[in-house]
Image: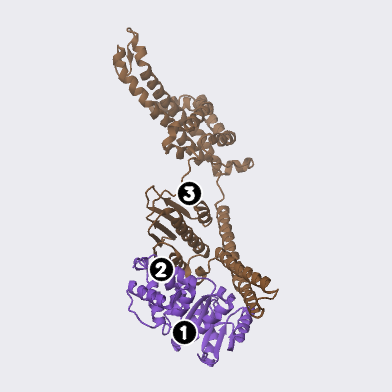
Chain colours: A brown, B purple
Amino acid sequence: MTTEHSSHLAEALRRRRWLISAWPWRALAYLVTTVPIAGFLAVGLLVIGGPMLPVFSTLRRHGRPPSIALMLFLITGSVVLVALAPLLSFAVAAVERWRVRLVDGRPLASSPWPGLAARYRSAATWREVAYLFWLGGFTPVAYWVFLILVLLDLGMISSPWLAGDANQPVVIWQPIDSTGEAIPYAIVGVLLIPVLWYAIGLLAAVQAAVARWALAHPVDAAALREVARSRTRLVGAYEAERRRIERDLHDGAQPRLTSLTLQLGLAQLDVPEDSPAARPLAVAHDQARGLMVMLRQLVHGIRPQSLTDLGLAGAVRELADAATIPVTVHADPHDELPEIVETTAYFVVSEALGNVARHAGATRADVRLTRAGGDLVVEVTDDGHGGADPARGTGLTGLADRVAAVDGRLLLSSPPGGPTVLRVEMPCRR
Amino acid sequence: MSSVTRVVLAEDEVLLREGLVALLTRFDFTVCAAVGSAPELLAAARDHRPDLVLTDIRMPPGRRDDGLRAAVALRAERPDLPVVVLSQYVQTGYAAALLDSGDGQRVGYLLKDRVAEVTEFVDTLRRVADGGTAIDPDVVRQLLHRPRDPLAALSAREREVLALLAEGRSNASIAGRLHVSEAAVGKHVGNILLKLDLPPSDDTNRRVLAVLTYLRADPAS
C-alpha cells in the first residue's frame, strides 16, 4: 500500500514528483537554517583548530613545539572545549531535533536533562558532541563546495549576457567572446538546475540522516518488545473471546432457538386451521425460523465453524465450493497456525472471492495457501478485468486493517484488463 | 416400512434433545435412546441396533465433527444402517463423507433448521429409514452452483428436477412439486441422465448418488 505522502525527505526523494513537490523548498529551508548554527560552531572550531595547524607543521619540521605559551593556550583551550562540549551540545541538539522536523515528519524524541554527572557519562551525550564537531567541521566544507557549484551554474546561465560585453571575456572552461559561443553553456546551465535541485535534497537528506543517527534518544528496546508482546496478547485474548462467544451461541443459543421453533411447529400440528390461535402461531413460527437463519449468519461472522472443524485448508475449500465460478485451491500442508492468523486468512479468502464474484467478471479464480519462512502467504488470483481499487470501498481497506492487526501485509496488483492478484503475508509467531 | 421405526438420537443440547424426542414420539417413532455425546451414541447404537440413527454433528467430547465421525464409524460396521445427520450449516464435505460411508444409501444430511418444518422433517426421516437418501436442498443448491460444462447443458427445468432428485424424492413427488405429470418428470430425468452421461437405471438412490458423486468431483480436474 503506497501513500502519496512521504513521511520524510529520503523517501520523498525517490518519488517522481520530487521536483514539483514542496520537499525541495523544505530541504532548502533546512539547509539555510543550518548556516548560522554550523557557522557559529565552525568559528569555535577554527579558533582552537586554526593555531593547531602551524603547531603541527612546526613539530614536523623542527621536532619541537613553537612556544610554551601557545602550547598551554592550545591545551587549555582543548580541555575547556571538551569539557564544555556536552553542555553546549545539549542546547544545540535540542534545536537540531526541532529543526530536523523541516525535512522529517517522524518525531525525534529528546531526552530530558539527566543531571550534570549523568550527562558526562552517557554515550548519547558523546554522540551529540560528535555531531557538534561534524556540524562545525564537515558541513561548512560541503556547503562551500555546493555554493561554488551553484555560482558556477549561475555563471553559465548568465554567460550570454555577460559575454555581450566584448572587452570582458567570461571564463568558464575557456574564454568566450561572443553571445553565440555562450549559448550552449547557458543551455547546459539551465539543464543542470534540476540536478542542483536534487542535490539540495540529497545534501539535506544526508544531513538529516546523520542528525537522526546522532541525536535519536536511544529508545528502550525492551519496552518496545513489551508493547509488541502485549499487543499480541491483546489480539490473542480478543480472538479467544470471539471463540468463546461463538461457542456459547452455537452450543447454547442456537439449539435452544431450534428447540423453540420445533415446539412451535409441534403446536401448529394440533391447532386447527380455523382457530384464532393458528395465525399468530404461524407468524411466531416464521419469525423464529427467520431468527435461526439470522443467528446462524451472525455466528458464522464471529468465527466460521468450518474453520474450527476442518482447519484452514478445509474451510477454504468449502468457500471455493460455495463460489459461483470455478475456484481451485492449492494448500500446502500446514502445521498448526495461530488461531488469529487462521481466522484472518479465512476472511481474506472469503472477502476476496466475494469481490471476484461481485466486480471482477472473472471466469475462474485460484487460491494458494503457502508457507514462506515463518509467514503464511495467501494468494487469490482471478482472470477478471482488473482495476480493483482499494479506495472504491471494495472491503479491501477493512481487509488490510484486519491483516495489519496481526502484523501482516496486504498487497494488491490489479491492472486494468486484469489479472488481479491479492497477496497477504502474515507472520506466524506463536 | 416396518410398523415401528426404532430411533437412537444424539444431541448434546438438552432442550433440543427433548424437543426431538417429543417430535419423534408424536409421529410414532420409538426412541430407544437419547444421548448427548459421540461415545454414548456409539454405545447406544451398538446396543439397540435401531432402524434409524439421528445425530447432531458438533458434539462432545471434541465438540467438532464427533457426531459425524461416530455416524460414519457405525455405518462402517453396519453399511445399511440408516443415518440422518443434522448440521448447523451447509458443508458439502460432510455430505460427501456421509455419502461415501457404508453402501452410500440410507443417509440424510440436513440443516438443523429443517427441524422446524415438522412434517417435512419427519417425511425425510421416514424416507431415509425406508432406504432413501436425503440431501438438504441448500447443499444441493451449492453443488449445482458449480459451473460445470455438462451441467451447463441442462435446462432450467432440468436443474430443478435434478435438485429435487438429489433430495431423494420419487418421480411422483417431483411431479407434485412442479405441477407436471409424472411422465414429464420421467422424461426430464431420462434427459438429465443422458446429458450427464450416466447410464439410465430405475434405482432412485443410484441416480442421486451418481449425480452427487458427479457434482462432488473437483471442478478443476
Residue wearing tag 1: B73
Query: What is the secondary structure assignment of the residue under circle 2?
Result: loop
Residue A231 on image: x %, y %: 57, 57
Name the front one of labels 3 and 2: 3
- Residue at image position (46%, 53%) is A410
Residue B70 appears anywhere in the view: no
Name the front one of labels 2 and 1: 1
Identify the disc placed on residue A333.
2
User: In the rendered image of this protein, does residue A221 appear above or below residue B155?
Assistant: above
Q: Nearer the viewer, residue A319 or B145?
A: B145
User: In the rendered image of this protein, does residue A91 appear above or below residue B173?
Assistant: above
Q: Which residue lies furthest to the top in this view?
A: A167
Query: What is the secondary structure assignment of the residue under circle 3?
Result: helix
User: In the rendered image of this protein, does residue A348 appear above or below residue A92?
Assistant: below
Residue A30 on image: x %, y %: 51, 31
Tag 1 subunit: B
User: Looking at numbered disc 3 in the image, what kind of residue is underneath it?
Assistant: Pro
Identify the disc placed on residue A390.
3
| Crowd band around label 3 with a 10 angstrom C-alpha radius: few (<14), some (14–19), many (20+) | some
Distance, label 3 to label 1, CA atoms, is 48 Å
| Crowd band around label 2 with a 10 angstrom C-alpha radius: few (<14), some (14–19), many (20+) | few
User: Looking at numbered disc 2 in the image, what kind of residue is underneath it?
Assistant: Pro
Distance, label 3 to label 2, CA atoms, is 31 Å
User: Looking at numbered disc 1 in the image, what kind of residue is underneath it?
Assistant: Ala
Residue A367 on image: x %, y %: 41, 61
| Crowd band around label 1 with a 10 angstrom C-alpha radius: few (<14), some (14–19), many (20+) | some
Q: Are marks 3 and 1 in contact (CB under 8 Å)?
A: no
Identify the disc placed on residue A88.
none
